[in-house]
Image (tube, rainbow, N blue to C red):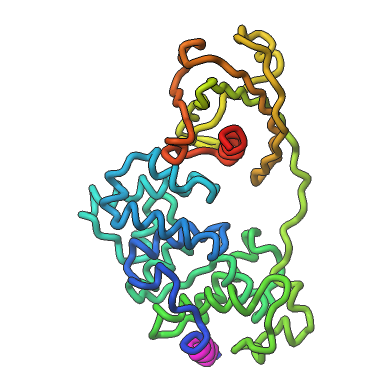
């Protein structure tokens, strides 16, 4: 069944697969790596313009390594999960400094680099170097779990182990480059989450979930856990000339290294000696993996920067330079509304 499965997937990919994505123009490690990191938790159509802008500014791993982190984060703004961008920058510097600008060729060596997990390492090594290793991104998990009726949520250790074992068991002995891309495409364009196109799937006859008429039951759903809601006040200072004050967050933690507004409690806000009473702006709700954050922005308008003492890591943003800063999403929304 192993080779028959791979043959059907590859034959389908040759005719119906995607061959014109920007990162497929050169199946070399750098663009493949950038695309794989961007595609984590993000759809292809969303990623394409980000990828193109990123590659235009940083066309090589050495260009990325020599860049300032602030600029990297500014080009990442809107993609979320900013630890990915920080790890890209770290890894680019490691590759430039310790690997003479050349990517390691094996999955095991790639795994030693920041931000590169088992599936991403497998994608780079199989697509770029034809190493016979499996990948297990969200799309491939869905295909494997349905074809072989592997129940359970893939985030659970036991289920993940079964999926990895099955993915490795189905690997062909040649055309790994194409097979890896084919499996991604099969999940992304045919084996869809909610409305799978089983009638045109090349492996529908082998699909145990389809045989049981329970395709959408696989993979198992993540157990629901109620997210707590936290709240914060963001202090927005704006000059009459249209400049808005930001502060850079610590390098680690939520929105690490990004620019945002100082966060306060109501008691801290009440104690501040502000030149004018704060005005409430529309509230925002931002969701993280483990909690929701309710943001209450308050605006204080001043004549000029000199009306306030400086704060650590401050920056002033205006219409002219707003693209130069890596902004957390709520700050981006607030600034867009203020400078519109």
Rendering coords of residue 52 (x, y %): 41, 60
* Left or right, 232 with reference to 22: right
Q: Quadrant of the N terminus?
A: bottom right
Residue 172, picture quadrant: bottom left
Residue 60, picture quadrant: bottom left
Q: Which residues are magenta?
A: 3-12
Q: Residue drawn 56% across and 15% down?
A: 302
Q: Is residue 9 magenta?
A: yes
* Left or right, 115 with reference to 146: left
Q: Main secondary structure of the magenta part?
A: helix
Q: Is residue 283 magenta?
A: no
Position of 326 relative to 45 (above/below):
above
Q: Nearer the viewer, residue 106 or 68?
A: 68
Image mark count: 0
Q: Nearer the viewer, residue 71 or 337?
A: 337
Q: Residue drawn 40% across and 57% down?
A: 111
């Amino acid at each position: 069944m192993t080779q028959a499965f791979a043959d059907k997937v590859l034959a389908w990919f040759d005719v119906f697969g995607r061959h014109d994505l920007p990162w497929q123009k050169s199946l070399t490690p750098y663009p493949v790596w950038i695309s794989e990191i961007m595609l984590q938790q993000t759809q292809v159509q969303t990623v394409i313009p980000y990828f193109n802008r990123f590659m235009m500014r940083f066309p090589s791993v050495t260009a990325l390594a020599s860049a300032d982190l602030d600029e990297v984060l500014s080009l990442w703004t809107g993609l979320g999960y900013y630890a990915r961008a920080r790890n890209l920058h770290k890894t680019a510097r490691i590759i430039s400094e310790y690997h003479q600008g050349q990517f390691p060729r094996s999955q095991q060596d790639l795994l030693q680099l920041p931000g590169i997990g088992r599936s991403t390492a497998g994608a780079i090594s199989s697509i770029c170097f034809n190493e016979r290793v499996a990948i297990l991104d969200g799309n491939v998990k869905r295909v494997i779990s349905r074809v072989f009726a592997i129940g359970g949520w893939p985030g659970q250790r036991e289920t993940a182990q079964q999926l990895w074992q099955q993915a490795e068991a189905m690997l062909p002995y040649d055309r790994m480059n194409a097979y890896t891309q084919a499996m991604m495409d099969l999940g992304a364009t045919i084996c869809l989450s909610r409305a799978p196109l089983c009638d045109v799937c090349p492996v529908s006859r082998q699909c145990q979930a389809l045989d049981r008429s329970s395709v959408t039951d696989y993979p198992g759903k993540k157990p629901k856990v109620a997210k707590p809601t936290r709240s914060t006040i963001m202090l927005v200072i704006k000059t009459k000339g249209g400049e808005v004050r930001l502060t850079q967050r610590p390098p680690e933690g939520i929105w690490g290294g990004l620019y945002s507004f100082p966060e306060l409690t109501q008691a801290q806000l009440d104690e501040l000696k502000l030149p004018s009473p704060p005005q409430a702006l529309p509230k925002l709700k931002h969701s993280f993996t483990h909690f929701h954050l309710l943001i209450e922005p308050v605006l204080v308008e001043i004549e000029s920067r000199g009306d306030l003492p400086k704060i650590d890591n401050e920056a002033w943003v205006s219409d002219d330079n707003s693209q130069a800063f890596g902004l957390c999403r709520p700050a981006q929304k607030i600034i867009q509304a203020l400078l519109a």
